[in-house]
Image: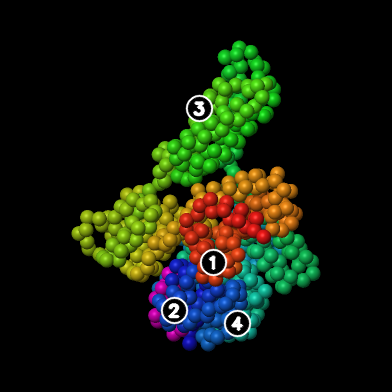
C-alpha cells in the first residue's frame, strides 16, 4: 500500500465531510486508505463518516486522547509506505497527493513533506514553512523582529520569510495540518510524542526527523486550503498558555545546559507577556465603545453645565463643585446601562433601541432626582438637555462605526453581501436555495459557469471570474465543488487572495456552505441548523445583566439568607463574587451530560435541572432540559432556578 491519510476529528463534522470528499478525489489513482480517528465528538461526526464514507476506516475513541495519541493509533495500524497527517478543516486539490507521493518517490532522503497552505480568503499562510524555535529564533519572534524584518535570514527564521511562497526548499518544521512522512523514517525516529496533547507535536517530530539525517521539504507545487490556520484564537489567553507550554516541553526535551535554560526562560516570559496582551486586547475589544460613550456623555454634560451657568443663571460657579463629580457619572452610568438593556450595543445598531434606552435612562434619572434631598436637586434643565445630548452622542458613535464598516448611514441594516454562485445546472440551483434558506443577508447577483448558457442570471464564464467580481462589486463567491474542481477553486482564491472577497465552498449534495474570512477566525458555516435563542448576543447580555443584578440584590442579604440557603455562608459569598467577577453564571447547563453541541456558557452555580426539585432525571431528560434551555432561553427561568435551588433543603 502506498499511502495512508489520517485525519483526527473533534466536533467539526461539516469540515470533516468536505475534507473527506476532497481526499477521496485525490486518492483515485493511489493505492491507499483513509483513516478518521474521532476524539469522542458529540456532533454526529462518527455517524456521518459511517453513513457517507463506509470505506473510510474509523476509530471511535471513548474520550479525547489528544492530537498526538489519536494520530498514533492509526499510524500503528497502517501498512502504507507513506502516511499523511491531515487536519479536518482542510481541502486538498485533486492532484495534491499524487504530486507529493511522486516527489517523495524521487527523493529518498526526504523524511517529511509539507505544502503551500492558504486560508479561506486565499491568503498565504506563513506557517506553511517554519524554522526551529531556538532561543535566538524565539527571542526574535517574542520581540516582534520577525514581523519587522520578515525576509531577513537572521530575524525572519520563524516563518522562513526569506524563502519564497512558491520556492521548493528544505525547512526545519512541517505544519501539523499537512505532514506527509515516510513510514520507514517514522519507524526509525518514533511516532508523535503523546506528551504533547495539542500544539508542538509537529515541531518535535520534524526535529527528530532532521536529527536522524533526513530532510523536511516545503513543496509549493500544490496547495491546500486550511480554514483556521495557526492563528486561530491566537489572542486568547488559553491559546497562549497551551501553545507556549508545549514549547517548554519541547525545550526541556531537546535542549541541554544554558540553551535549555535560556529558551525555557524566554518562553515563560513570552507566556506572561502574551497572556497579558491577550487579556488587554480582549478587555479593550469588549469595552471601548462603552468608554467612548461615557467620555462623550460626561463631556457633553460638562459643556451643558457651563452653558447653563453662563447663559441661563449668569453666574459661573452656580452649581456646587461636587455636582459634576457625583451626578454626571451617575447619569452616564444609568444611560449606558439602559441603552445596553434595550439592545443599543447589539449589531446591527438600531435608532429605536438607542432612543428607547435613553428615554428609559432619563425616566430613571428623573425618579431618582425626586428622591434626593432638595439640597442635591441641582437642575431638571440639565437632565432634559442631557437627554438630548445623550441621544445625539449614542447615535453618533453608532453612525461612525456603522459607516466605517458598511460605508452607509443606514442604521439597523447590516451589509447585504453581493454574492455569486459558480456552478452548473441543478447543483447551482440547489445551492441558491440553500443560500436563500440560510437566513444570512445576501444579495444574489447571478451565476458564473463554464458551460454555454442562455440563462439571464448567468453573468459570464469562469475563465473571467476576476473581471466579473470587479464589474459587479462582488463580496462573496460560492463554489459548487460538484462542478468546480478544488484545483480551480484554489487557483482563483490564490489569484484574488487579499481582496475584500470572501470565498465559500459547497460540498457535493450537502446542506452546508463552508468558508472563512481570514486565518484568524474559525471557518464560517451556513447551514439549515437549529437556531438557539441563548446563542444571540441579546440573550447573552440579558443573562449577564441578570447575574449582576441578582448578585447585587443578594449581597446585603447574605447573612440572613445563609440561615436558609443550602451550604455555608462562605460558599454563598464565594459563589456570589465569582458571578460578579464574570467567571461564573448563576444558572447554566447540567454538565453531567454532554453539552458540546449547545451554545457555550460559563460554569454555573446552579444548573437547569435543579428547578425540578428532588426528581431523579435520566441522561436523556437532562439532555432535553439543556436543549430547551438553550433553544428558548428566558430570564424568568434563571430566576426560578436560583430560588428553587438556593432554598432547597
Q: Give the CA distance from mark 2 to mark 1.
A: 27 Å
Q: Give the CA distance from mark 1 to mark 3.
A: 50 Å
The answer to whether marks 3 and 2 mark residues whose Cβ atoms lie closer than 8 Å is no
Query: Does 19 lie within the magenta span?
Result: yes
N-terminal label among 3 and 2: 2
Q: Position of residue 89 (x, y in %)?
A: 49, 67
Residue 409 at least partly seen:
yes
Q: Which residue is mark 3?
A: 388
Quarter-of-image position of residue 403: top left
Q: Position of residue 483 (x, y in %)?
A: 32, 68
Q: Give the CA distance from mark 4 to mark 2.
A: 29 Å
The answer to whether marks 2 and 1 mark residues whose Cβ atoms lie closer than 8 Å is no
Label 2 sits on a secondary structure element that is helix
Q: Which residue is mark 1?
A: 622
Q: Nearer the viewer, mark 4 or mark 1?
A: 1
**Residue drawn 48% across the image and 75% down it:** 46
Q: Give 528 or 176, whichever is nearer the viewer.
A: 528
Number of other residues with Cα within 10 Å of mark 1, as a class: few under 14, some 14 to 19, many 20 or more: some
N-terminal label among 4 and 2: 2
Number of other residues with Cα within 10 Å of mark 3, as a class: few under 14, some 14 to 19, many 20 or more: some
Q: Which residue is mark 2?
A: 50
* Magenta span of residues: 18-32
Q: Give the CA distance from mark 4 to mark 1.
A: 46 Å
N-terminal label among 4 and 1: 4
N-terminal label among 1 and 3: 3
Q: Which residue is mark 4?
A: 186
Label 1 sits on a secondary structure element that is helix
Up the image or down, 333 lies above or below 491; here it is above
N-terminal label among 2 and 1: 2
N-terminal label among 4 and 3: 4
Amino acid at each position: 500500500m502506498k499511502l495512508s491519510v489520517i485525519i483526527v476529528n473533534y466536533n467539526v463534522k461539516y469540515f470533516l465531510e468536505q475534507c473527506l470528499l476532497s481526499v477521496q478525489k485525490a486518492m483515485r489513482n493511489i493505492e491507499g486508505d483513509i483513516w478518521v480517528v474521532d476524539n469522542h465528538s458529540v456532533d454526529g461526526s462518527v455517524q456521518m463518516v459511517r453513513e457517507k464514507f463506509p470505506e473510510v476506516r474509523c476509530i471511535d475513541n471513548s474520550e479525547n486522547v489528544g492530537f498526538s495519541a489519536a494520530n498514533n493509533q492509526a499510524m500503528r495500524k497502517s501498512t502504507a509506505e507513506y502516511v499523511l497527517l491531515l487536519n479536518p478543516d482542510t481541502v486538498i486539490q485533486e492532484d495534491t497527493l499524487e504530486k507529493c507521493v511522486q516527489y517523495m518517490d524521487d527523493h529518498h532522503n526526504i523524511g517529511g513533506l509539507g505544502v503551500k497552505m492558504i486560508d479561506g480568503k486565499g491568503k498565504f499562510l506563513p506557517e506553511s514553512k517554519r524554522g526551529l524555535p531556538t532561543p535566538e529564533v524565539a527571542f526574535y519572534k517574542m520581540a516582534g523582529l520577525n514581523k519587522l524584518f520578515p525576509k531577513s535570514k537572521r530575524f525572519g527564521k520563524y516563518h522562513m520569510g526569506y524563502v519564497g511562497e512558491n520556492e521548493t526548499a528544505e525547512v526545519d518544521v512541517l505544519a501539523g495540518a499537512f505532514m506527509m512522512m515516510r513510514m520507514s523514517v517514522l519507524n526509525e525516529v518514533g511516532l508523535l510524542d503523546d506528551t504533547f496533547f495539542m500544539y508542538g507535536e509537529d515541531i518535535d517530530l520534524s526535529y527528530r526527523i532532521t536529527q536522524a539525517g533526513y530532510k523536511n521539504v516545503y513543496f509549493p507545487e500544490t496547495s491546500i486550503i486550511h480554514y483556521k490556520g495557526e492563528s486561530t484564537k491566537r489572542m486568547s489567553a488559553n491559546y497562549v498558555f497551551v501553545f507556549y507550554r508545549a514549547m517548554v516541553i519541547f525545550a526541556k526535551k531537546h535542549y541541554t545546559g544554558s540553551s535549555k535554560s535560556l529558551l525555557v526562560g524566554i518562553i515563560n516570559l513570552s507566556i506572561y507577556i502574551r497572556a497579558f496582551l491577550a487579556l488587554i486586547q480582549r478587555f479593550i475589544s469588549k469595552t471601548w465603545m462603552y468608554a467612548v460613550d461615557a467620555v462623550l456623555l460626561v463631556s457633553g454634560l460638562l459643556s451643558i453645565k457651563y452653558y447653563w451657568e453662563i447663559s441661563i443663571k449668569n453666574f459661573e460657579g452656580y452649581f456646587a463643585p461636587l455636582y459634576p463629580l457625583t451626578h454626571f457619572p451617575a447619569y452616564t452610568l444609568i444611560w449606558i446601562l439602559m441603552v445596553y438593556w434595550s439592545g443599543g450595543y447589539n449589531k446591527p445598531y438600531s435608532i429605536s433601541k438607542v432612543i428607547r434606552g435613553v428615554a428609559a435612562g432619563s425616566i430613571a434619572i428623573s425618579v431618582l432626582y425626586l428622591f434626593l434631598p432638595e439640597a442635591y436637586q441641582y437642575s431638571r434643565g440639565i437632565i432634559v438637555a442631557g437627554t438630548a445630548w445623550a441621544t445625539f452622542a449614542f447615535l453618533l458613535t453608532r453612525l461612525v462605526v456603522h459607516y466605517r464598516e458598511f460605508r452607509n448611514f443606514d442604521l439597523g441594516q447590516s451589509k447585504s453581501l453581493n454574492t455569486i454562485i459558480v456552478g452548473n445546472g441543478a447543483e447551482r440551483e440547489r445551492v441558491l436555495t440553500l443560500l436563500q434558506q440560510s437566513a444570512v443577508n445576501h444579495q444574489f447577483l447571478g451565476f458564473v459557469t463554464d458551460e454555454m448558457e442562455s440563462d439571464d442570471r448567468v453573468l459570464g464564464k469562469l475563465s473571467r471570474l476576476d473581471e466579473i467580481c470587479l464589474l459587479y462589486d462582488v463580496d462573496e463567491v460560492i463554489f459548487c465543488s460538484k462542478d468546480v474542481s478544488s484545483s480551480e477553486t484554489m487557483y482563483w482564491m490564490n489569484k484574488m487572495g487579499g481582496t475584500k472577497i470572501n470565498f465559500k465552498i459547497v460540498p457535493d449534495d450537502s446542506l452546508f456552505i463552508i468558508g472563512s474570512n481570514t486565518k484568524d477566525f474559525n471557518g464560517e458555516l451556513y447551514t439549515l441548523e437549529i437556531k438557539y435563542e441563548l446563542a444571540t448576543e441579546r440573550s447573552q447580555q440579558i443573562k449577564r445583566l441578570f447575574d449582576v443584578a441578582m448578585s447585587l440584590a443578594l449581597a446585603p442579604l447574605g447573612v440572613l439568607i445563609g440561615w436558609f440557603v443550602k451550604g455555608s455562608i462562605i460558599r454563598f459569598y464565594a459563589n456570589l463574587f465569582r458571578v460578579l467577577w464574570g467567571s461564573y453564571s448563576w444558572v447554566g447547563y447540567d454538565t453531567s451530560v454532554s453539552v458540546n453541541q449547545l451554545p457555550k456558557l460559563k460554569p454555573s452555580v446552579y444548573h437547569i435541572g435543579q428547578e425540578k426539585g428532588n426528581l431523579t432525571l435520566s441522561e436523556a431528560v437532562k439532555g432535553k432540559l439543556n436543549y430547551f434551555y438553550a433553544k428558548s432561553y428566558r430570564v424568568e427561568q434563571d430566576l426560578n432556578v436560583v430560588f428553587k435551588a438556593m432554598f432547597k433543603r
